[in-house]
Image: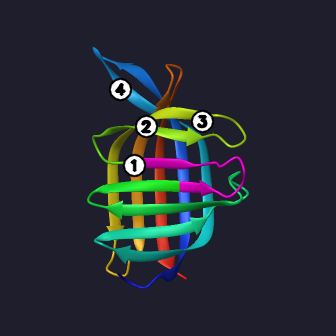
Amino acid sequence: MSIKKNVNLRITSTQYSENLKPSGEAFLRELEKEDSLEIRTEGTMYKKNNARYISYEESEEAGLENSHTLVKLSDGSIRIRRYGTGDDDDGMDMTLEPGILNITRYQIPKMTTVSLEVYTNSLDEDLDEEGYGTISVDYRIRFDQFFSRRNILEIEVMPS
């Protein structure tokens, strides 16, 4: 097990709607940017059992004050767990693994819990020996037949 070290994080989450655009006899998938959020925060990073962990406190600007997030990167997958500290625990536990469809339960802040279908298109991890660099994951979230969004999440890990 390695020692925890402080890191600076730049976390960018961009959400797109997907549209099919006619192209000859086929269709092209076209992404239209819907929303983007960038958070800069401090966190900690450590290695344990061939996995790399990044831990940080969520921000008020993301509507997730009093929440803690733990990111586990191992064996070509990323697991993101969020823990709330209030009575209405805004929890999330999502595993993203390329080519795999996962069902995730997500507690919407101050609302109900929903089940989400999460399909991961790609996961790129470009971290050096020190653990600095960028993690990028492209995935689709869907719940019920009406809501489907493509998300690109980037976590940049920098020395503190």
Q: Give the x, y percent position of residue 39.
A: 62, 61
Q: Work out whether mark 4 precedes mark 3 in sequence or the reverse, and give the earlier one.
A: 4
Q: Give the x, y percent position of residue 110.
A: 73, 41
Q: Is residue 106 above or below residue 160?
A: above
On screen, residue 86 versus residue 92, left or right, reads: right
On screen, residue 89 versus residue 138, left or right, reads: right
Q: In the image, which is nearer the foreground, mark 3 or mark 2?
A: 3
Element type where label 4 sits in the image = strand
Q: Amino acid at mark 4?
A: Leu
Label 1, label 2: how many angstroms apart (C-alpha)? 12 Å
Q: On residue 113, which mark appears?
A: 3
Label 3, label 2: how many angstroms apart (C-alpha)? 19 Å
Give the magenta part as a residue range: 82-94
- Tell me, yes or no, whether the highlighted magenta stretch contains residue 24: no
Q: Are marks 4 and 2 in contact (CB under 8 Å)?
A: no
Element type where label 3 sits in the image = strand
Q: Amino acid at mark 3?
A: Thr
> Is 105 in front, or is 118?
105
Label 3, label 1: how many angstroms apart (C-alpha)? 17 Å
Q: On residue 140, which mark appears?
A: 2
> Is 38 in front, or is 27?
38
Q: Amino acid at mark 2?
A: Arg
Q: Work out whether mark 4 precedes mark 1 in sequence or the reverse, and give the earlier one.
A: 4
Q: Which residue is mark 4?
A: 28
Label 4, label 2: how many angstroms apart (C-alpha)? 17 Å
Element type where label 1 sits in the image = strand
Q: Give the x, y percent position of residue 67.
A: 65, 58
Q: Which residue is mark 1?
A: 95
